[in-house]
Image (cartoon, grey):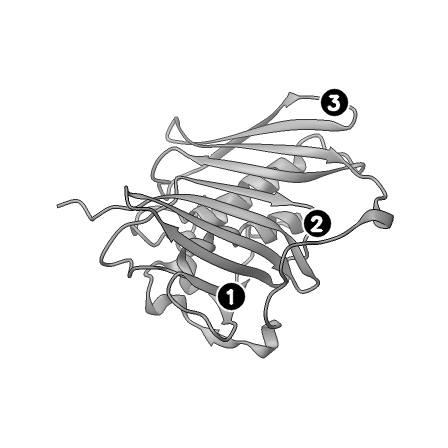
Amino acid sequence: MPTLHVQGAWNDHEQHMSPVGGLITHELTLHEPRDDMQIARINFEILGLIPAEETHISVSTIRPGRTIELLEATLTIGGRVIIRARAWRLCRQDTSEVAAVELPGMPASPDACTAYNPSEEWPGAFLASLRMNAAPGGRSGRRSVWVQSTKTLIEGVDVDPLASYVMLIDTANGIATRVRPHTMMFPNVELSVHLFRQPEPCWVGLDTGVTFGDTGIGLTSTTLNDVHGPVGRAEQCLTVRDFPS
């Protein structure tokens, strides 16, 4: 059951995708767990508005394997499929001798950043529940922000650290807006997350750029960080449009 603290930004009767993504990730980590594997990629297809109502998630393995597996999670509300997610789970190997990272790290640590209040631009109780620190030099369309939640994902449950991290990634589409959200709509219809290592969830670093095309399509692109450095990438495909008349 969702609480007020998952309330979305576009409508007060919907759930924000960010905590819903965390919830789905939590269920993926619980499905036939294997210590010798890790989730490397999750794609969330958002099929419609996510009502703030009783939420059900089912998970299955659609491609079993010894070293590679593909999982699928389906989120339904009121008997309707709202989100389909697929996750590649890959075997763990010791590749420390060849490890190298080409992704940029955050320009400043959380302590060296300035408090950033998303509620000055966005409504919704979920965003109001977050703590954010912005790195110097941010502007419309480009910003680096550290994000932390003041709430637990599931009351009374020790959730997987990956779920606690993923539950904040979808906020990337709201931290470097090109236009103000009260003048145009630009919701994302999907979220794709790629991870080359397992992140620590204390602070989620979002180094984000937003691109708008000239035919109503946009892309929010984010390098994901934790306090130790980059952990992967996230992409969000946007539908850029005027508000309905």
Q: Which mark is residue 65?
A: 3
Q: Which mark is residue 198?
A: 2
Q: Position of residue 188 (x, y in %)?
A: 39, 44
Q: In the orientation shown, which residue stands out farthest toward the left? A: 245
SS class, disc 2: loop
Q: CA distance from mark 2 to mark 3?
A: 21 Å
Q: In the rendered structure, which amino acid carries the disc numbered 1?
A: Val
Q: Within 10 angstroms of label 3, few (less than 14), some, or many (20 or more) residues?
A: few
As shown in the figure, which amino acid type bears the numbered disc 2?
A: Gln
**At x 79% / y 24%, what residue is drawn?**
66
Of callouts 2 and 3, the N-terminal one:
3
Asked if disc 2 and disc 1 are in contact, CB closer than 8 Å, the reply is no
Asked if the residues shown at circle 2 and circle 3 are in contact, with their CB atoms under 8 angstroms apart, the answer is no
**Left or right position of 100 against 109:** right
| Direction from residue 146 to residue 116 in the image, left or right | left
Percent position of residue 241, x then y: 25, 46
Crowding at label 2, few (<14), some or many (≥20) Cα neighbours within 10 Å?
some
Task: Residue 131: give x, y in percent of width and height.
Answer: 50, 68
Q: Which residue is mark 1?
A: 145
Q: Secondary structure at mark 1?
A: strand
The residue lying toward the viewer, choosing from 13 and 157, is 13
Q: Give the alpha-carbon distance from disc 1 to disc 3, as whole Å.
A: 38 Å
